[in-house]
Each structure stands twice: as C-alpha cells, then as structure tokens.
Amino acid sequence: MDRFQILGGSPLQGEVSVSGAKNAALPILCASLLTAEPLVLSNVPRLRDVSTMKKLLAQMGTRIETVAQQPDGQEQLSLHSDAMTHLQAPYELVKTMRASVLVLGPMLARFGEALVSLPGGCAIGQRPVDQHIKGLAAMGAEIRIEHGYIKAQARRLRGARIVTDMVTVTGTENLMMAAVLAEGTTVIDNAAREPEVVDLARCLVRMGARIEGAGTDRIVIHGVDRLGGAQHAIMADRIEAGTFLCAVAAAGGDVVVCQAQPDMMGATIEKLREAGVLIQEVAQGIRVVASDRPKPMNFRTAPFPGLATDMQAQLMAVAAVATGTSIITETIFENRFMHVQELRRLGADIEVDGHTAVVKGGAGLSGARVMATDLRASAGLVIAALVASGETEIDRIYHLDRGYDRMEQKLCAIGARVSRTTEKA
C-alpha cells in the first residue's frame, strides 16, 4: 500500500499545471453510451476513478482506444459504444465508485433498459439516488428495486417537468443525459449549477443535443431522435486548482496554477483573499502569492457558486495555521469531518460540534503518521504536512489517487519535499 512522506517547511515557487476534471470526465465518459458513433475525448486525467469508469464501460461493451498520450501525461481517448453486450453495472464496480450510477440515464434513454447496482453507503455520508429514480419515473420509466439493483425499463422516455427535492449534481447529470433522447421537452428545476454540469452539456450539444440553461437552476432539454459522434476536451479540474491555491496559502510562496479558471472556482478565491492571500488572474491561469501566515476565515459549504464541500478539508488545513479562530460549517455531507482527528495528530486545535468545526489557528504543526479517510481529506492532510515541522507520513493515499494525478510529482516541481513509498503486503 502506497504512502506519502512529506518534509514540511518549504515555501512553494514556480508553476504547476492542473489536470482534466475528474467530476467532469466521469459523466462525459458515460455520455458515450448515448451514441453508436465515436466520442473522442482529450484532457482525460489518469486517475483511479477514471480507470474504474473505463473498466465499467468496457465490461458493458464499449471499445476504448487511447488515441494519444498528451505532453502533460493526460490521455486522448476514443470511445465506441456501437455494439453493447451487457446493459448492466454490477455491484463489484459500483461499490468502489458511486459515480457509476451515471450509466443509468444514458442506458435507459438509448436502449430502453438498464440494470444498475444501488451504490450503497459512502465514507463522507449518504448520497441517495432517489432523485435520479424520481426524475426517470416522471419521464415514463418503469423502475423496480430488486436484490440491490435498480431495474429500469422504458420503450422511449417522454419529456417531463422535474423538480428535484435537493440540488444534486449526479442527479442533474443523469436526468440531463436521459432527456436528450426523450420524446418532447424536459425541464429540470432546482438543477445543479456546477461547472462540471455545464461541461457535460457542452459535450452533449456537440453530439447533437438541444440543451438550454446549463449553469442555471433551470435546464431545458429538447429531445432528439439520435446523437452523433463528437470531439470534446475535458475542462480543467477546479478542485485540484483550489487545492494548489490552498497549499500555497498555508505553506507560503509564489506559484502560477496553470489552466486554472477563476470563474469556475466559486467562493474558494473569495475565502483565500479574505485570508490575506494574493490571487491574480494571469495569462496561464491563476497566480497565488502568500508571504505571511493566513488570516482566519469563516464559511459554510454550499452548492455552486458557493464554497464547494470538496474544498472544505483543504481550507480547514489553511485555517489550522491561521492567526486566529475560523468557524467552518459543513452543510452538504453529514460525515465530512473525519479528517479533523488526523489534523489533530499534527497539532491542529479543532473542536467539532455537530456540523460546525471551530479551528483555533496559531498552534505549530509537527509531523506525525496520519491516515487518509477519503479523497479530499487526503488533500487536506497533504497541505497540513507541507507546513508541519519534521516528517509526516500519510497512509492510504489510494484515496488521493482517485482524484489527483501525480500529486507528489507536481508538488515536488514547485519546491515541496514529497516522496511516495510502497509498503509490501
């Protein structure tokens, strides 16, 4: 099992590039199920979750070819879903990655049937798929839950008005993909506004879909009879970009985060500026300069354009070294403070009361052995370790590899002292 060893205390300098967005790549890979023609994708990140999705699609019958390795190490893929053989997503794969449920809408829309395992629980909290099922049922699908699977059938989906009970990113994406081949017009109210939803819509439009309002809370989809092939570049990963911004904010330095797009960062930039960090838009992306310890900041996680829950752990690490007390409230997932105990092992002063964490900055962090509990918790621990005196060992970084491409290499390129070691079983 791999782990990181990090020697803290080095400011960060230079340039670092952001990879393609995991949360955009996964639904767009699933969009290949909507057409018999090739879908060619570039800027595809090399991540554990992307590999899992490719394995699932290949098991269903999609042929996936690597067209080219890009200079930055990312891939250009060509996906061919013209001869599907198994219209199901088995538990063995869905249990390892909840985003596998995104095959449900495309399969049902194009083939009239789908069998998808229920995702089950998740370390950071329950994320039920009831809104997916509710929306597809409104579009005329017959859905049964049997033996832990969603069994869906529809001769052809029909347009409908769908009002989700909560803002759900994967729910919006699943319903949008289902609606593009439905008969008539579908309206999704209370839709997710995240940039990854917009990127999926952009790809679907290139394939021939008719979509209006992506990026707002009301998306209108006019169904078409068929979609064709297309070429699409996956957007840059705004969460990876935000993670590097937080790393500089905590450790100090002057770094240009290349490919980062300020308009997609939501409230992250605002909070870092509140902490006294200099953030500038430059030709290559975003420049971040931190010469002093950060100031405290208060925030609540919220759907886009609010403060992303996926940035909470990273900003908490910044708050742990700030000059005062920060108050952080998690509103999206009920169990997303698991990194608190590990940050305490590094010396952070954090108290949790329900969904609120009070972070008293100023205590010096010192290296220790800690354990990653989920993807973004891993990133928060890395940021804290960059500041801590001495050496920090972070176990179970397979969580990190789900969403960050070659993080240790990128950090080392800007002056961090990070190494990956493999412990033999």
Image (cartoon, grey):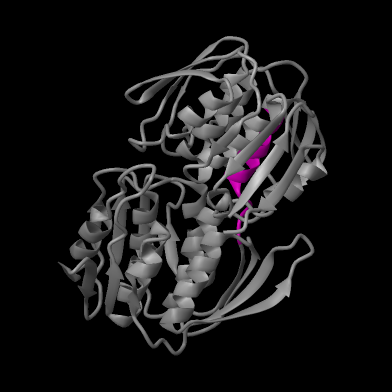
149 with respect to 203 (left or right)? left
Overall secondary structure of the magenta section: helix
Q: Which sits in the foreground, 285 or 53?
A: 53
Q: Which residues are magenta?
A: 234-249
Residue at left 48%, top 44%? Answer: 374
Q: Residue 223: x, y in percent?
A: 35, 70
Q: Which residue in the rendered view is the most extreme toward the top?
A: 324
Q: Position of residue 398 (x, y in %)?
A: 55, 53
Q: Residue at x 76, y 26 (%)?
A: 9
In the image: residue 267, left or right of residue 6: left
Dividing the image into 4 quarters, which one contains the C terminus? bottom right
Answer above or below: position of 4 versus 381. Answer: below
Quadrant of the rendered structure where residue 275 is?
top right
Relative depth, front residue between 236 and 338 = 338
Question: Residue 18: within the magenta?
Answer: no
In percent of width and height, residue 124 lies at 39, 42
Quarter of the image where one finds residue 231? bottom right
Residue 380 image point, x, y percent: 57, 35
Which residue is pictured at 36% across the width and 31% down the height? 331
**Residue 142 visible here:** yes
